Amino acid sequence: MEVQLFSSLNEYEINQVCAILTQNDIPFIRKDEGSGSYMSLYMGQSIQEKRIFVSKDDYDKAIDLISSLMPNEIEIEEVKEDEEMEEDESHQKHVLIRRGLGFFILGFPIILIVIIVIVLFIQGNI
């Protein structure tokens, strides 16, 4: 099971942590939030948060290494318990549902108006 070790908007900090983990043979997963991966490829940088995950077994070793090599630059994430992770996932689902409803409530009338204008234009009433 992977746990989040570190997150940042700063690409330089993320690269430092990745280098430390690689040099010490600690496997990790780097994830960009949202469209961050696409933005990095397309624009060369991303404004989305980047996260680094390590296995639960390697977490303490990784914390010690990063804390000793970069003591003032990085705030280390606390390991989240399973219940907290489930709450985060539940919260993310609720946020997505709210966004979807917001788009539907705001977007549907706009789309309907555009369709009506197009139909009236085709009929020659505009």
Image (cartoon, grey):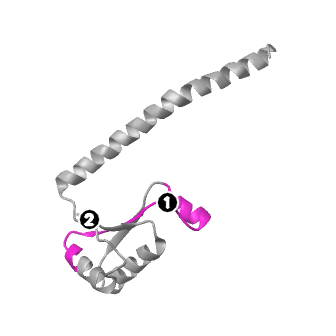
User: Could you tell me which quadrant the N terminus lies in?
Assistant: bottom left
Q: Residue at label 2?
A: 2
Q: How many marks?
A: 2
Q: Are marks 2 and 1 in contact (CB under 8 Å)?
A: no
Q: Amino acid at mark 2?
A: Glu
Q: Amino acid at mark 1?
A: Gly
Instruction: Determine which of the numbered discs, if any, sits on residue 36 in the image.
Output: 1
- Nearer to us in this view, 107 or 42: 107
- Nearer to us in this view, 65 or 115: 65
Whether residue 59 is in magenta: the answer is: yes
Residue 42 located left or right of residue 69: right
Circle 2 residues within 10 Å: few <14, some 14–19, many ≥20: some
Q: Nearer the viewer, mark 2 or mark 1?
A: 1
Q: Which residues are magenta?
A: 35-61
User: Of callouts 2 and 1, which one flags the residue occurring earlier in the amino acid sequence?
Assistant: 2
Whole-number angstrom distance, CA of label 2 to CA of label 1: 20 Å
Residue at screen point 21% across, 60% down: 80
Whether residue 97 is in magenta: the answer is: no
Residue 79 in the image: x percent, y percent?
Answer: 22, 64
Provide the secondary structure element on which disc 1 rests: helix
Residue 93 located left or right of residue 46: left
Residue at screen point 72% across, 22% down: 118
Provide the secondary structure element on which disc 2 rests: strand
Instruction: Determine which of the numbered discs, if any, sits on residue 69 in the image.
Output: none
Residue 2 located left or right of residue 119: left
- Nearer to us in this view, 3 or 106: 106
Residue 26, image quadrant: bottom left
Residue 44 in the image: x percent, y percent?
Answer: 59, 68
Residue 113 in the image: x percent, y percent?
Answer: 64, 22
User: Could you tell me which quadrant the C terminus lies in?
Assistant: top right
Residue at screen point 55% across, 30% down: 107
Circle 1 residues within 10 Å: few <14, some 14–19, many ≥20: some
